[in-house]
Image (spheres, rainbow, N blue to C red):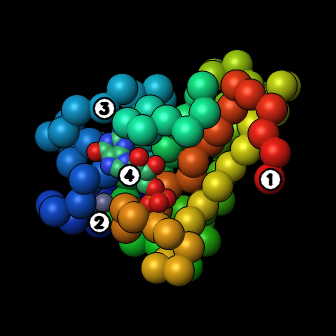
Amino acid sequence: MTGTYPTDEYCIFCRIIARNAPAKLRYESEHVVAFDDHRPKAPTHVLICPKGHYPTFMETPDEVLAQLEAEIKIVAERLGVGERGFRMVVNNGRESGQLVFHLHYHLLAGTVMGF
Ligand code: 5GP
Ligand code: ZN
């Protein structure tokens, strides 16, 4: 992967990544950002995205997914939830309830979660 990646000027997460929209950033690397969900559904609710604009999980190149998942481990450690546990959720496509079409993993933690 190079330092350049696809973007979409109308995408809210691309705007956050470009610092054109506000968010509470938790982590940033060359390829990945993590920031607080603005409507948290758990005490810790962080969205972890590739900097590249890939609308869905299915449309995301395998190497981007591999890099992202490796860095999710780092984010979880930095948030202090690596040991205690956390839930990861990825909505993929219309019927999943996906609302923002820039791939993101939800990391939810800080409470005991049932199904
Ligand atoms: P999805 O259903 O697409 O997986 O979830 C999108 C998530 O993004 C939701 O949990 C929603 O609260 C969050 N979200 C939507 N717009 C913004 C925003 O502008 N800033 C932040 N921080 N979170 C957002
Ligand atoms: Zn985007």
Figure check: 36 above or below 107: above
Q: Earlier in the sequence, mark 2 or mark 1?
A: 2
Q: Position of residue 95 (x, y in %)?
A: 53, 80
Secondary structure of residue under mark 1: loop
Which numbered mark, 4 or 3, is in the foreground of this view? Answer: 3
Q: Left or right: 3 with respect to 57?
A: left
Question: What residue is at 23 percent from the left and 60 percent from the top?
Answer: 11
Residue 82: x, y in percent?
Answer: 78, 28
- Disc 1 packing (10 Å; few <14; some 14–19; many ≥20): few
Which one is in front in this view, the residue at disc 1 or the one at disc 3?
1
Disc 3: which residue: 23
- Amino acid, disc 4: Lys
Locate residue 113, reporting x and y percent: 78, 39
Secondary structure type for disc 3: loop
Q: Residues within 10 Å of mark 3 (few under 14, many from 20)?
A: some
Q: Quadrant of residue 22?
A: top left
- The x, y position of residue 97, in whole percent, is 50, 69
